[in-house]
Amino acid sequence: MGTEPTLSADSGLRIADFCREIETYLCRKNDGHLIRVTGPSFDLVAGWAQQGVPLKVACAGIDRYFERYYRQGPRRRPVKIDFCDADVLDVFDEWRRAVGISRQSTVDGRQSATGRRSLPEHLERVVTRLSSARASGSLDAGFDSLIDAVERELDEARASAGGVRGDARRVMIERLAVLDADLLRQARTTIDERTRAGLAREAEADLAAFRASMPPDAFTRAREAAIDRLVRDRFGLPTIAYLQA
């Protein structure tokens, strides 16, 4: 993932500021080539802001498009922000489900255009990201035995995921949730209180667009889930759980 803009710890960014940050981020991803976010492109990005898409989530969607773009071979022209729309909405949909915000909480009801990954595709991505996280050096030795165990189980699951149905599929999905919780628990133990407080402020900023419409207990749950999401980002950890609508 590329270098991300810094989020303010208050109630989030105004639409114009959000669009400016996205333009700057896109410029960096395009190796300094400036593609203006104006006209219809501004309206598109403003729509993300109006839906409550956190800046980091939008950047993660842009990253996802660029990852796919690079896999297609040498680049030929700079990427326009419009090309990233489906990926941004996909990542927003994943974030929304992870923190417990319903589709009805978004402003205009737009949904992902590319659909959810199948279970085999999900497992493949999880194994790849776990390997990348370990190789990056961002994880201490305390993760090694847990990651080894997780990767073994995921390899076994991948061998049969395409043909698993009914109760067997349900059991597999439940097991993925347990593995996910174990990995996240390990990550949380390595974070000090000062860092956690900073992540909590950032989580509240990400949720600012939804806070007024959420009951206090729902906001508390969403806040904890958003902190978990930021912990994952900090260590480059995937979501092992297979999130369903």
Image (cartoon, rainbow, N blue to C red):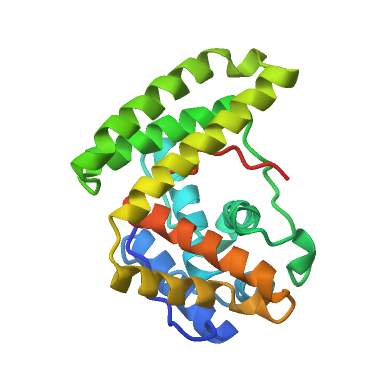
Q: Position of residue 29 (x, y in %)?
A: 37, 60
Which residue corresponds to the image point at 30% horizontal and 60% vertical from the top-left? Answer: 191
Asked where in the image residue 193 lies, by quadrant, the reply is: bottom left
Asked where in the image residue 81 lies, by quadrant, the reply is: bottom right
From the viewer's perspective, tell me whether residue 135 is left or right of residue 209: left
Q: Is residue 162 above or below residue 115?
A: above
From the viewer's perspective, tell me whether residue 40 is left or right of residue 238: right
Q: Nearer the viewer, residue 51 or 204?
A: 204
From the viewer's perspective, tell me whether residue 236 is left or right of residue 65: left
Is residue 236 at all visible to an observer of this figure? no
Which residue corresponds to the image point at 51% horizontal and 19% vertical from the top-left? Answer: 158
Q: Position of residue 146 (x, y in %)?
A: 33, 33
Which residue corresponds to the image point at 43% horizontal and 57% vertical from the top-left? Answer: 78
Q: Nearer the viewer, residue 22 or 76?
A: 22
How many marks overall?
Answer: 0
Q: Nearer the viewer, residue 31 or 127?
A: 127
Q: Is residue 72 above or below residue 139?
A: above
Q: Position of residue 203 (x, y in %)?
A: 49, 70
Q: Report the quarter where the C terminus lies.
A: top right
Q: Position of residue 115 (x, y in %)?
A: 69, 42
From the viewer's perspective, tell me whether residue 88 is left or right of residue 47: left
Is residue 25 at all visible to an observer of this figure? yes
Which residue corresponds to the image point at 75% horizontal and 19% vertical from the top-left? Answer: 166
